Image (cartoon, coloured by chain):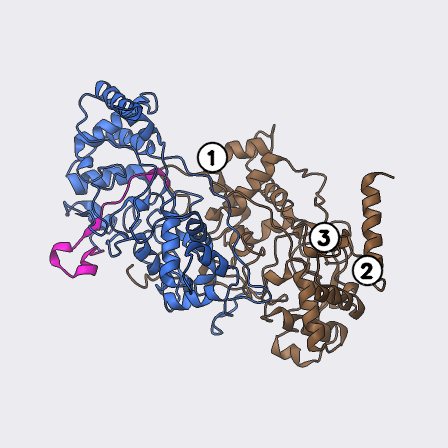
Chain colours: A brown, B blue
Amino acid sequence: MGLKATLLLGSIMTLSVANPSLAADWQALPDQAPFPADNPPSEAKIELGKILFFDPRFSEHGTLSCNSCHNVMTGGDDNRPNSIGMHDARGGRSAPTVWNAAFYSVQFWDGRAATLEDQAKGPVANPIEMGMASLDEAMARVAKIPGYQPLFEAAFPGEPNPITGDNAVKAIAAFERTLITPNSPYDRYVKGDAAAMTEQQIRGMETFDALGCTSCHSGANFSGPTLPIGTGFFMKFPTYPGSAYDAKYKLTKDPGRYEVTKKAADRHLFRVPTLRNIALTAPYFNNGQVPTLDKAVQVMAKVQLNKDLTEAQTADLVAFLNALTGEFPELALPRLPGTPNMSVIPPVDPHLKVKAHR
Amino acid sequence: MGLKATLLLGSIMTLSVANPSLAADWQALPDQAPFPADNPPSEAKIELGKILFFDPRFSEHGTLSCNSCHNVMTGGDDNRPNSIGMHDARGGRSAPTVWNAAFYSVQFWDGRAATLEDQAKGPVANPIEMGMASLDEAMARVAKIPGYQPLFEAAFPGEPNPITGDNAVKAIAAFERTLITPNSPYDRYVKGDAAAMTEQQIRGMETFDALGCTSCHSGANFSGPTLPIGTGFFMKFPTYPGSAYDAKYKLTKDPGRYEVTKKAADRHLFRVPTLRNIALTAPYFNNGQVPTLDKAVQVMAKVQLNKDLTEAQTADLVAFLNALTGEFPELALPRLPGTPNMSVIPPVDPHLKVKAHR
């Protein structure tokens, strides 16, 4: 038995002694995310993906990048009920965090994309998001930016025409797979540092398990069991409809995965979201209608477990969820390659009114 | 005479020998920008200013930061004719670059702000930009974000209530004064590296001087002489109205500085903009109506100097202007302090239509 295994065993034992009642399989966040066989990471690919992730020029008006709604300077979303796309458009769902998204087995609230690569194709051509006519139109802009040519060549060596939509989303996905937030108080605790969480956080962890939250929010990412890519771990929300929350927070308006499959059994099914960094991603749920984490915890207990929480339970659970805020890697601000002497963003629709002068 | 002075003299001599016909006072960009006596820079202030610069939560919908329109990942603007603010609003003027803005003696196209501090107060409360009701409303959001408290305390030590609008804009201005792009081919050339510019760029430099461009675009920042803060170096645009360009590019629509002073003599006066990194900030002019740099150069020669350029002159001038693209300092991506368990961005106006589901 090597040193690592010994330490691991030591950790588990420490944990068992400290919390003998815990039944859940508590896992720390891995340092590396899985990746598809056809898209192994490389430094050049990750760097290209990062630049693309921050580049707003592939949105219709040149104003929105991936980072606009999945802001890696924060908890990886936009802290809004929904995001704002081209022409001031809003969708009905809240932007999920990009942090640790690499650990999901499907992407989007309704799981309509199997991989991060597939996911990245969506917003670019969504009329209420980045609003390009197609991924190809976006790539036509990329191709006009001279500095992208060497970046694509380095990321996809040997390909005669590397500037393709498929390669762009591969690079973005490769970058996103580096967006991992390890070493949260929870992670340090389950690795054996008994002082990493406060007493209240430990109580919250026990409550989280005892109530049954772990039946969905399990695994290292608190988003369900590790499943093959494309499988998806979905749950009905609300599982117990009929509470006052349904109307108050419009919980039954969105048919969820039904929109993808048109199967009645998929009505109101949603991918179980990660709880990592959940304290930083208010407002909450698929429609972003619940403004605070304490209210979100109470709603979940009621509509998923049919339980009414005490104030103390709520506070403990919120404290535990705050222990899931991890360490965010330091990133350098990317430099976006320029288009000397011109812009790739077309002048905007002439029908738009100029509302004031300055 | 110390080593530095000797080197400088050597540089000037080299330049004089290489280009005996040059009359202009060619200056390299200073490494440091001037600052007001009441706002000396400090590391803590610059760091706070940078975080505020990137934080979108002080816009009405939580979607726009300073960096949205003055993108330091690019040439410091948004490569658009005009910027897009809250509610899809557009203004009539093009966002000036933030790079080297510290070398201006006034801010905005019409010089309506004396300092970067004053400038930073504008967009936050402009209904067609960040759209807050007031700077105070923005600061009320800042005050709700716990992580800002220690940042303001470190930046403004000893102040009992450091979270104020005045301090916020001081910090932003202190950060902006670090946004300097030295060591362009032009800078290296005038410091004595005769190989730093191409032959065409040197021809373009001579043409730039001979045509009279330097009568306005002079000094280290190519934005006129160094003047006391608040003075402003303005010029009439177009100086020679009546060309076909007036209608084509709507050159006489904007009354310029007249809007600020209401003096007839200020009609169509604009601050002379820097030409540094001009190759990266298309489209051009106060209204962003001219899409390319070669066209911009031809328009300027015609409407400011009443001269028609040849294709060769145009190409040489564009080449020279590309030699003004400097080195951009490496910046770390800031981490925006979170608001655990809640969002400071209010849910958006209920009258807005949700246009689609996803």
The tag on residue A147 is: 1
Q: Is the C-beta separation of discs 3 and 2 under 8 Å?
A: no
Give residue A47's position: percent from left, percent from top.
56, 38
Look at 31% across and 46% down and name the residue there.
Answer: B102
- Secondary structure of the residue carrying numbered label 2: helix
Kind of residue at badge 2: Ala
Q: Nearer the viewer, residue B101 or A353?
A: B101
Circle nearer the viewer, 3 or 2: 2
Q: Sequence-wise, which precedes: disc 3 or disc 2? A: 2
**What number is the disc on residue A18?**
2
Looking at the rendered structure, the secondary structure element under dot 3 is helix
Between circles 1 and 3, the one closer to the viewer is 3
Image coordinates of residue B317 in percent, x first then y, are: 27, 31
Residue at the limit of the structure toward the front, as seen here: B158
Query: Is disc 1 in the same subunit as disc 3?
Result: yes
Q: Quadrant of the C terminus of chain B?
A: bottom right
- Is residue A258 among the parts visible in the rendering? no
Instruction: Tell me whether marks 3 and 2 sit on the same chain.
Output: yes
| Percent position of residue A206, x then y | 78, 66
- Label 3 and label 2: CA atoms lie apart by 14 Å
Q: Which chain does the residue under circle 1 lie in?
A: A
Query: Residue at left 48%, top 38%?
Result: A143
Q: State the mark number for residue A40.
A: none
